[in-house]
Amino acid sequence: MHPMGWLQRLMYGRYGGDSLNIALLIFSVIVSIVLRVVGGIVHLPWLAVFTAIPVGLVIFRMFSKNIARRQKENQVFLKIFRRSAGSVKQKTARAQDTLHKYYRCPKCKQQLRVPKGRGKICIICPKCKHEFIKKT
């Protein structure tokens, strides 16, 4: 018999772990650290509940048999997380790009990249074909 067979039998038909559970655990650890720092200044023992709530959610989600619902929750989380992570990645890439300047088309709001150091140029939006003049 496999040494972890009891765990496999216990988790059979249950949801298990996912990205949202990991994020909840990380959030719980961060809140715990913040509460330790704040707890050194102000003693409020009931604040420890805020670290237990995410851990309780993780346990509930892992042992849940409503797999479709848990997958949907995870997909919503990933959609939000990817959008915000993509925005941060895009801003850091733009900050490191010293060869180009970025503008938005005044008509369709499409983001446009043009080379720096060309003086005043006529920019033509590839999406809506609107023309506008900007200094690079």
Image (cartoon, rainbow, N blue to C red):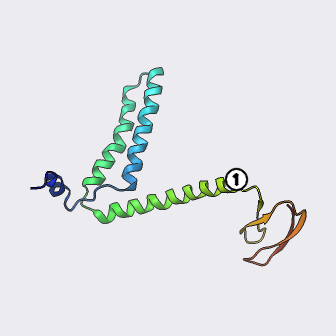
Farthest residue, direction bottom = 129
Q: Residue at x 72, y 56 (%)?
A: 97
Say which residue label 1 marks. 96
In the rendered view, does 129 fall on the left or right side of 58?
A: right
Q: Nearer the viewer, residue 34 or 5?
A: 5
Q: Position of residue 53 (x, y in %)?
A: 35, 42
Q: Residue at x 75, y 78 (%)?
A: 128
What's the residue type where badge 1 is placed?
Gln
Q: Quadrant of the C terminus?
A: bottom right
Q: Nearer the viewer, residue 105 or 136?
A: 136
Rendering quarter of residue 45: top left
Kind of element beneath mark 1: helix
Q: Tell me if residue 59 comes above or below residue 32 in the rendering.
A: below
In the rendered view, does 53 fall on the left or right side of 99?
A: left
In the rendered view, does 37 fall on the left or right side of 125?
A: left
Looking at the image, how many numbered discs can be counted on the residues?
A: 1
Rendering quarter of residue 110: bottom right
Q: Quadrant of the N terminus?
A: bottom left
Q: Position of residue 122 (x, y in %)?
A: 87, 71
Q: Position of residue 129 (x, y in %)?
A: 78, 78
How would you rate the neighbour count of disc 1 (Cα within 10 Å): few for under 14, some for 14-19, many for 20 or more? few
Q: Position of residue 101 (x, y in %)?
A: 78, 60
Q: Tell me if residue 17 comes above or below residue 106 in the rendering.
A: above
Q: Residue at x 74, y 67 (%)?
A: 112
Farthest residue, direction left = 1
Q: Residue at x 51, y 59 (%)?
A: 82
